[in-house]
Amino acid sequence: DIQMTQSPSSLSASLGDRVTITCRASQSISTYLNWYQQKPGKAPKLLIFTASSLHGGVPSRFSGSGSGADFTLTINSLQTEDFATYYCQQTYSTPYTFGQGTKLEIK
Amino acid sequence: QLQLQESGPGLVKPSETLSLRCSVSGGSLRSRSYYWHWIRQPPGKGLEWIGSSYYSGSAYHMSSLKSRVTISVDTSNNQFSLKLNSVTAADTAVYYCARSVVRTSGDAFDIWGQGTMVTVSS
């Protein structure tokens, strides 16, 4: 199975900040990497697919990059609604696996 | 807009079978363009993919659950199901159903149900 490791596990930031979350795969997964946002008590929402493509309706302050085994999610100019937990996911091969999550909190 | 809705018992006894259904509305499950998935999330923990099925019935499962999991598709009722047998407390989780778009560049789970909490307890 492909292991996905996110860092940091938690992050404190202020409104307007730029934050970066990283995700590393245990082997190369090309760009078969998605990012999701989850708020408490809610289902995850797709933000980014194939490493860098923005899902419809997602604000442009979200961006993704990377290929191979190393990926990043960047959020520019943090808004109140961005404070949530973020997960990466590989769909290179089954079983599809998620990172452990990064909780973004208000400083 | 396609929507997914999970349903099933919220409480299951240890060693019994967990059975959940995901109803698809606003679109057809019978499509070559999508896969249909089950994902779970234990309380306070991360997401775990359980398995998926195509409309034709072919399925893929998480290896550690493979012997206990059955995912099936009912195209006539536009729903798909999860059965997990011999459950233990470790199977307590919120269970989500989701859809992914079939892409050569990799699937992405673009629509999710709201999730249903299942507790395994006597």
Image (spheres, coloured by chain):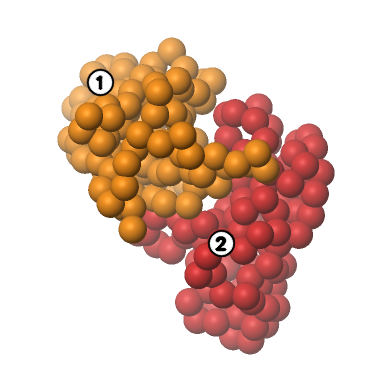
Quarter of the figure with the N terminus of chain A? top right
> Picture coordinates of residue B36 (x, y %)?
42, 36
Q: Residues within 10 Å of mark 1 (few under 14, many from 20)?
A: some
* Label 2: how many Cα within 10 Å (few below 14, some 14–19, many 20+): some
Horizontally, is B97 left or right of B24 in the view? right
Q: Of the residues shown, which amino acid type is indicated by label 1? A: Thr
Relative horizontal placement of residue A62, taking residue A83 as reference (left or right)? right
Q: Residue at x 60, y 41 (%)?
A: B103
- Report whether A20 appears left or right of B109: right
Kindly identify which residue carries mark 1.
B17
Seen in the picture, residue A27 relative to A11 is either above or below; the reply is: above
Which color has been applied to chain B in this rendered view? orange
- The secondary structure type at the circle numbered 2 is loop
Q: Marks 2 and 1, how far apart in space?
A: 36 Å
Chain A: colour as depicted: red
**Disc 1: host chain:** B
Closer to the observer: label 2 or label 1?
2
Q: Amino acid at mark 2?
A: His
Quick check: do tags 2 and 1 share a chain?
A: no
Q: Is residue B20 above or below residue A19?
A: above
Viewport quadrant of the C terminus of chain A:
bottom right
Counting from the top left corner in percent of width and height, residue B70 is at 36, 20
Provide the residue designation for mark 2.
A55
Q: Foreground residue, B65 or B91? A: B65
User: At 43% from the left edge and 43% from the top edge, which residue is drawn?
Assistant: B99
Closer-to-camera residue (B117/A64): A64
